[in-house]
């Protein structure tokens, strides 16, 4: 089997706290990482820019007052994650030391705006939601209206809250959360117009991408005793399908300790064409694999 360079989480991955918040420490780490880039003399920021100055001053205030239980930290972190999401749309693999964030001059107003958005409040009035805007399809809208009337006496907000609650409950099960990860991977592949096949066969990865000769195995939990079965599945996929690339995809909310424990398999070179990544880095991984295949 021809050997290829393999993308690694350490080279293509972005910190989880760039994409999602697990606790206040993620907000702190994100804001401080951005602050480090802002303060670099050879960095991408104009030191005297008004927005940059405002951000530096805000970070100084956070350091004095503390990051924990600080709602401004929470909402500023939310705003920065949205900004990074926009950058990632044009930069497959961004670097905060190179790609700057455009800071508003009135950072206080931006933080307040994020708070209002989170609380579904705009200019002191609740945002109006209609069945017509949520369900353009008339048949689906009719069904939703009927269920809303029967279950929640016509209360649309209660109906939507119930749907979200049920989805959250269903995704807490082992099989459902795996399917959620599979759907995310399928979506990323479809965005690149790459065909994927679901295998679900004993001894083969969950997904197979013929165009890239790529096997994708999904794991939403990990224990040390799972290692033997995982290696067997990956090895069998290599043998049966002559895979050039293998990747194990795990949730973003895997603890750092669990993720590094799993990555020991990759680091030991047990399987030479294997990468182990978080699902949030799957898009970057695909871009790297495409580059490798084209060389």
Image: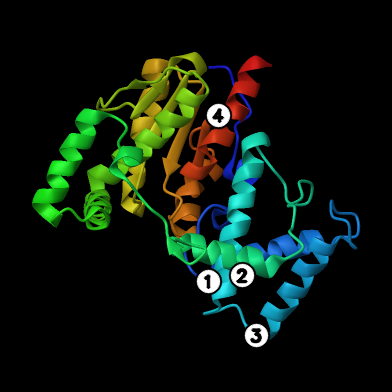
Badge 1 vs badge 2, beta-carbon distance below 8 Å: yes
Give the structural element (helix, strand or loop) at label 2.
Answer: helix
Badge 2 vs badge 3, beta-carbon distance below 8 Å: no
Give the structural element (helix, strand or loop) at label 4.
Answer: helix
Q: Earlier in the sequence, mark 3 or mark 4?
A: 3
C-alpha span from label 1 to label 2: 6 Å
- Tell me what residue is drawn at x 44 percent, y 38 percent: 248
Q: Earlier in the sequence, mark 4 or mark 1?
A: 1
* Residue 61 falls in image quadrant: bottom right
- Tell me what residue is drawn at x 46 percent, y 51 percent: 252
Which one is in front in this view, the residue at disc 1 or the one at disc 3?
3
Give the residue pinned by disc 2: 28
C-alpha span from label 2 to label 4: 30 Å
Q: Earlier in the sequence, mark 2 or mark 3?
A: 2
Q: Residues within 10 Å of mark 2 (few under 14, many from 20)?
A: many
- Tell me what residue is drawn at x 30 percent, y 38 percent: 179
Q: Earlier in the sequence, mark 2 or mark 4?
A: 2
Give the residue pinned by disc 4: 286
Give the residue pinned by disc 1: 24
Badge 1 vs badge 3, beta-carbon distance below 8 Å: no
| Circle on res. 65 | 3
Residue 102 in the image: state x and y as whole percent.
Answer: 75, 52
C-alpha span from label 2 to label 3: 12 Å
Badge 4 vs badge 1, beta-carbon distance below 8 Å: no
Give the structural element (helix, strand or loop) at label 3.
Answer: helix
Q: Residues within 10 Å of mark 3 (few under 14, many from 20)?
A: few
Residue 128 in the image: state x and y as whole percent.
Answer: 38, 53
């Amino acid at each position: 089997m021809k050997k290829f360079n393999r993308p690694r989480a350490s080279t293509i991955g972005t910190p989880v706290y760039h994409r999602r918040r697990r606790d206040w420490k993620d907000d702190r780490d994100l804001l401080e990482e951005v602050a480090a880039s802002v303060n670099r003399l050879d960095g991408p920021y104009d030191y005297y820019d008004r927005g940059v100055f405002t951000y530096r001053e805000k970070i100084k205030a956070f350091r004095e007052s503390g990051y924990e239980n600080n709602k401004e930290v929470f909402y500023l972190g939310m705003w920065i994650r949205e900004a990074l999401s926009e950058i990632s749309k044009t930069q497959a693999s961004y670097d905060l030391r190179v790609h700057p964030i455009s800071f508003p001059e009135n950072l206080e107003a931006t933080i307040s705006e994020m708070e209002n958005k989170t609380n579904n409040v705009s200019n002191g009035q609740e945002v109006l939601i209609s069945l017509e805007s949520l369900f353009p399809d008339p048949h689906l809208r009719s069904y939703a209206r009927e269920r809303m009337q029967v279950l929640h006496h016509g209360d649309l907000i209660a109906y939507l809250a119930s749907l979200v609650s049920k989805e959250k409950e269903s995704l807490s099960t082992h099989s459902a959360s795996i399917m959620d990860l599979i759907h995310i991977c399928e979506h990323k592949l479809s965005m690149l117009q790459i065909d994927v096949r679901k295998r679900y066969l004993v001894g083969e990865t969950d997904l197979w991408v013929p165009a890239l000769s790529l096997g994708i195995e999904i794991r939403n939990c990990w224990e040390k005793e799972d290692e033997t079965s995982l290696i067997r599945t990956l090895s069998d996929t290599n043998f049966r399908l002559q895979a050039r690339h293998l990747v194990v995809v795990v949730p973003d909310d895997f603890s750092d300790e669990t993720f590094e424990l799993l990555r020991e398999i990759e680091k030991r070179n047990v399987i030479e064409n294997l990468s182990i990544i978080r699902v949030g880095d799957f898009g970057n991984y695909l871009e790297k694999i495409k580059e490798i295949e084209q060389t």
